[in-house]
Image: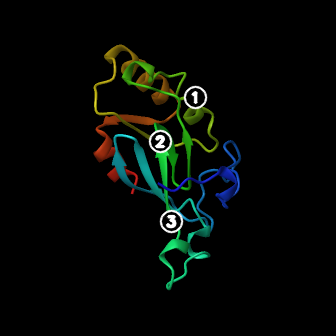
Amino acid sequence: IIRRSLSEIGRGGADLLGADALSLDGQRKIVLDSYMPTGFDVLGMLDHAEDYNDEDDEKLKKSPVLHVNGSMIAFPTSFFLWNVDGPKDVTLESLSLVIIRDPSVEFLFIGCNHTLPPREMNRIRREMKEKGIVVEQLDLVSCSVVLL
């Protein structure tokens, strides 16, 4: 296990609400590489991995993979930790980041291996539809593939 502090992530912050929030303008796209019970492996977040590679010394090589423990809300060039523990915690309020994003997103894929409560899922779909956002629930693996 490689521990990294937030200061090692060289990409800087992400503008959640600005007009360039979803544009790729030269930014590297992140990739959800794999999923494990502890979380996701994310490629494209760590810029420093190549800077420290030394072909002669295995100890100096750093992985370009960032393992994220827990749930996240992912956008093309960034992700944000999402404080949900299970399907009952996925609510319209917990998805407020998606709603306030400017420019707004067109599609919201909710990855969960368990069915979300139907009443709350219908509420999420109804509110998101009013904002022009299509919502689909998928299992985690399918959702990760869609983000590629």
Q: CA distance from mark 1 to mark 2?
A: 21 Å
Mark 1 vs mark 2: which is more N-terminal? 2
* Residue type marked 3: Pro
For the residue carrying disc 2, how many other residues have a C-alpha within 10 Å: few (<14), some (14-19), or many (20+)? few
Identify the coloring: rainbow
SS category of the residue bearing label 2: strand
* Crowd around label 3: few <14 · some 14–19 · many ≥20 (10 Å): some
Q: Nearer the viewer, mark 1 or mark 2?
A: 2
From the viewer's perspective, is 99 left or right of 16?
Answer: left
Q: Quadrant of residue 99?
A: top right
Point 28% across, 38% down: residue: 139
Residue 7 picture location, percent across and down? 70, 54
As rendered, which of 77 and 126 lies closer to the eye? 77
Q: Which mark is residue 96?
A: 1
Q: CA distance from mark 1 to mark 3?
A: 30 Å
Which numbered disc covers residue 69? 2
Question: Circle 3 is placed at which residue position?
Answer: 64
Image-based side of 53 in relation to 15, left or right: left
Contact? badges 1 and 3 (CB < 8 Å): no
Nearest to N terminus: mark 2 or mark 3: 3
The mark nearer the N terminus, 1 or 3, is 3
Q: Residue 18: x percent and y percent?
A: 71, 47
Location of the C terminus by quadrant is bottom left
Residue 70 percent location from the top left of the image: 46, 37
Circle 1 or circle 3, nearest the eye: 3
Residue at horizontal 50%, vertical 40%? Answer: 73
Which residue corresponds to the image point at 44% horizontal and 24% vertical from the top-left? 90
Amino acid type, callout 1: Ser
In-image side of 106 versus 6 (left or right): left
Secondary structure at numbered mark 1: helix
